[in-house]
Image: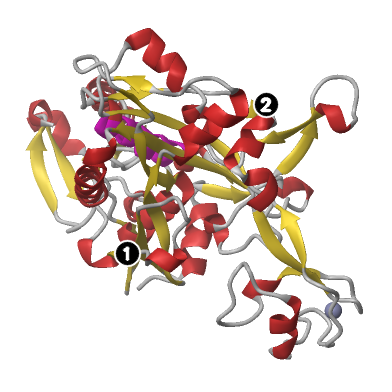
């Protein structure tokens, strides 16, 4: 199993992910995607969209605003309950998430329970804690020119509410039959007290969420279908090994009171098993809340029977960064003489790398340019590399996951063939240019 620090190091070295605001010493809990990271991230998000939306007849897209009416978060419960237990050391004034300082504590930990554990401040080593306070994780901002309590707004803590609040707009404009889903990709923000674990727990993240609206009587069946489709997506489209993925059936006492079933799909990351995504059967909780808060009717009218009801909802929700790290973890391989990212071909930033054997031989460079352009026209994601020697080029392409390296040598000028080197086997074969 790879180590997290090896992956972090590769990400920085090869331009996948940099610490946010690096030049100014960083900004805790933020990360920037570099040129290679953007390509991989876009492949992941595009394939998700293709799988869940484009290929299906029952899914539609939404792209809602990040700043929403604050009543959204009152109705959803975020204003009251999107809290973490915050504890402060009275000696050094460091602040921590109480439930993460020791074992066997959850978000509802009380000050008494916490103090009984006799945990010392990780910063100064003293034992002198203040009371646990509820810390709301929404990022607050002000909208308009006046900053007072009436202008408070929040950066959305999840993308889901942008979908729910558009349910009626969609039903009234495109008249979808049940069941149907609305999908959204976008940024979400949570003011984590102590961001950590690289991109797993950051303050700004990208989510891909679906709200799948169903007839109440069909809920459990549709849940099974979405769970099965989720596994196909993770294992076949994303190439995650089946043995690293685990379904955790969340027991009733740990589920939200409105949820009829929740499965946390977990993944074996380098630093342990962690949630990769969740599928929650949320019943009519969200639409009912919106109906109550807004006073607008959220019912759906069945086109055949004329019956009206609030649909139930099943929500598959995944964080892009979590999936990104799962993909890297699965692909990363370090053996005696090289590091290689064995990314599935549909995810690899570049499909081919083209280079002339020697960069100071104009006839080789000209021929290589010709091959490069041909492949670029055909596959788009093709890179050119004439730096250093061939060995160094292979090393670099292995680390960024390029499946095939094409080298043009003197024989190529005679026989119109090139050497194709395979990333995974390192085998080299002679291939006609016309057959690439
Ligand atoms: Zn302290």
- Decide if ligand 1 comes within 8 Å of the CB at mark 2: no
Magenta residue check for 45: yes
Of residues 241 and 109, which is closer to you in this image?
Answer: 109
Of residues 118 and 120, which is closer to you in this image?
Answer: 118
- Residue 73: image location, x then y, percent: 64, 37
User: Residue at 48% of width from left, 29% of height from top?
Assistant: 164
The answer to whether residue 392 of the structure is visible from this angle is: no
Q: Residues within 10 Å of mark 1 (few under 14, many from 20)?
A: few
- Residue 110: image location, x then y, percent: 70, 75
Instruction: Tell me the tag on residue 249.
Output: 1
User: Residue at 77% of width from left, 53% of height from top?
Assistant: 25
User: Residue at 10% of width from left, 47% of height from top?
Assistant: 429
- Decide if ligand 1 comes within 8 Å of the CB at mark 1: no
- Residue 357 falls left or right of residue 172: left
Instruction: Tell me the tag on residue 269.
Output: none
Of residues 31 and 123, which is closer to you in this image?
Answer: 123
Work out which quarter of the rendered image holds the C terminus and state it. Answer: top left
The answer to whether residue 128 of the structure is visible from this angle is: yes
- Residue 315: image location, x then y, percent: 38, 42
- Residue 301 falls left or right of residue 292: left
Report the residue marked by disc 2: 69
Identify the magenta region.
38-52
Where ligand 1 lies, by image quadrant? bottom right
Q: Identify whether 320 is placed above or below 194.
A: above
User: Residue at 29% of width from left, 33% of height from top?
Assistant: 214
- Residue 272 falls left or right of residue 13: left
Magenta residue check for 293: no
Tag 1, which secondary structure?
A: strand
Of residues 322 and 6, which is closer to you in this image?
Answer: 322
Label whose residue precedes the other's in the sequence (2 or 1) = 2
């Amino acid at each position: 199993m790879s180590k997290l620090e090896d992956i972090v190091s590769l990400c920085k070295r090869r331009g996948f992910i940099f610490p946010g605001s690096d030049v100014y010493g960083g900004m805790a809990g933020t990360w920037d995607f570099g040129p290679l990271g953007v390509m991989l991230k876009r492949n992941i998000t595009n394939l998700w969209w293709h799988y869940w939306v484009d290929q299906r007849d029952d899914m539609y897209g939404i792209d809602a605003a990040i700043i929403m009416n604050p009543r959204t978060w009152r109705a959803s419960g975020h204003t009251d309950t999107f809290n973490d237990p915050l504890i402060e050391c009275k000696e050094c004034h460091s602040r921590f998430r109480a439930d993460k300082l020791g074992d066997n504590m959850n978000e509802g930990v009380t000050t008494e329970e916490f103090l009984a554990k006799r945990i010392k401040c990780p910063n100064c080593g003293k034992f002198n804690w203040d009371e646990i306070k509820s810390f709301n994780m929404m990022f607050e901002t002000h909208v308009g020119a006046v900053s007072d309590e009436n202008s408070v707004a929040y950066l959305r803590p999840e993308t889901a509410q942008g979908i729910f609040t558009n349910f009626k707009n969609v039903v009234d404009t495109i008249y979808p039959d049940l069941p149907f889903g609305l999908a959204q990709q976008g940024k979400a923000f949570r003011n984590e007290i102590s961001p950590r674990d690289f991109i797993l727990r950051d303050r700004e993240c990208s989510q891909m969420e679906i709200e799948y609206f169903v007839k109440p009587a069909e809920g459990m069946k549709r849940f099974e279908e979405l769970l099965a489709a989720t596994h196909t997506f993770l294992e076949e489209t994303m190439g995650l090994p089946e043995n690293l993925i685990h379904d955790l059936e969340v027991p009733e006492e740990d589920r939200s009171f409105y949820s009829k079933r929740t499965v946390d799909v977990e993944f074996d990351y380098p630093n342990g098993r962690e949630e990769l995504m969740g599928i929650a059967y949320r019943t009519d909780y969200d639409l009912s809340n919106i109906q109550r808060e807004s006073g607008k009717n959220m019912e759906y009218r069945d086109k055949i029977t004329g019956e009206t009801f609030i649909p139930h909802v099943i929500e598959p929700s995944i964080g892009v960064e979590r999936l990104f790290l799962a993909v890297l973890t699965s692909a990363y391989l370090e053996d005696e003489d090289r590091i290689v990212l064995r990314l599935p071909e549909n995810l690899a930033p570049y499909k081919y790398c083209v280079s002339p054997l020697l960069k100071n031989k104009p006839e080789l460079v000209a021929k290589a340019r010709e091959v490069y352009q041909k492949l670029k026209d055909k596959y788009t994601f093709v890179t050119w590399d004439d730096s250093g020697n061939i060995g160094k080029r292979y090393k670099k392409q292995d680390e960024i996951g390029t499946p095939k390296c094409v080298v043009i040598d003197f024989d190529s000028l005679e026989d119109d063939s090139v050497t194709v080197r395979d990333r995974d086997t390192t085998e080299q074969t002679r291939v006609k240019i016309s057959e690439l």
